[in-house]
Image (cartoon, rainbow, N blue to C red):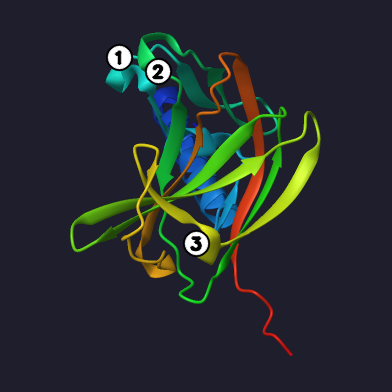
Amino acid sequence: MNQGRMHYPLKKVTLLCLLLTGSFLCIRDAIASGPNMIDFTHPNEQYLWTATNDNVMGGISTGRFIYDGQLSQFTGELSLANNGGFSSVNRRIELQSSEADTVELISIGDGRTYQLRLTTWTNGYRVNYKHDFTTVQGERLNLVFHLSDFQAVFRGRLLNDAPKLDINEVKQIGFLIADKQPLPFALNLVQIQFLTSAPKK
């Protein structure tokens, strides 16, 4: 008879290990993707994103957000059939910097033009703001966008009477492609940060 030693059923031990592993992954990803930064090198990031394609309007373009083993990727194929031609992905964010005035994006593109999108909710009123950027095939780019340069849009049309983008009201971030090229696309994503510009001297 063994004394001082306890034996647990294998199923209980396995379940405990899975729970502890899941908790570790959640903590790790929470640290990696802080309140003002998204780290696209972590595999769990893909589960936070939702795709919206032109099939909501009768189109047949495809698009999704995946993890390729090293980076996150917004990938798919545009089609102009049925008056379609766009694909987008987005996810919710909760920023904790009321002084941020720029967005830094690190990505590896395919030569196509994309939109970085920020969405606000103010008093039940939703507004999408976009900033276009053009990628270079296979080249890693570090791009900085000033919040004051984002443009309010609705279904592809500019909204001239929309309020200026307020960082404190941003609740969603996303990417969209609608460059009228009926071809496959792939935008590899490394990191996004919301930063405060250095004060002018």
Which residue reaches farthest bottom? 201
Task: Identify the amino acid type marked 2.
Answer: Gly
Instruction: Indicate which disc, 3 or 2, sits on the residue closer to the N terminus.
Output: 3
- The part of the image, by quadrant, that contains residue 9 is top left
The mark closer to the camera, 3 or 2, is 2
* Measured Cα–Cα span from mark 3 to mark 2: 35 Å
| Residue closest to the eye, 178 or 34 | 178
User: Label 1 belongs to which residue?
Assistant: 58
Residue 110, can we see it?
yes
User: Which image quarter is the C terminus in?
Assistant: bottom right
Q: Residue at x 34, y 65 (%)?
A: 163
Residue 84 — which label? 2
Which residue reaches farthest front? 160
Image spot of residue 16 (x, y percent): 43, 36
- The part of the image, by quadrant, that contains residue 200 is bottom right
Image spot of residue 50 (x, y percent): 40, 32
Image spot of residue 100 (x, y percent): 54, 71
Q: Secondary structure at mark 1?
A: loop
Residue 35 — which label? 3
Q: Residue at x 56, y 53 (%)?
A: 33
Q: Are marks 2 and 1 in contact (CB under 8 Å)?
A: yes
181 displayed left or right of 124: right
Q: Secondary structure at mark 3?
A: loop
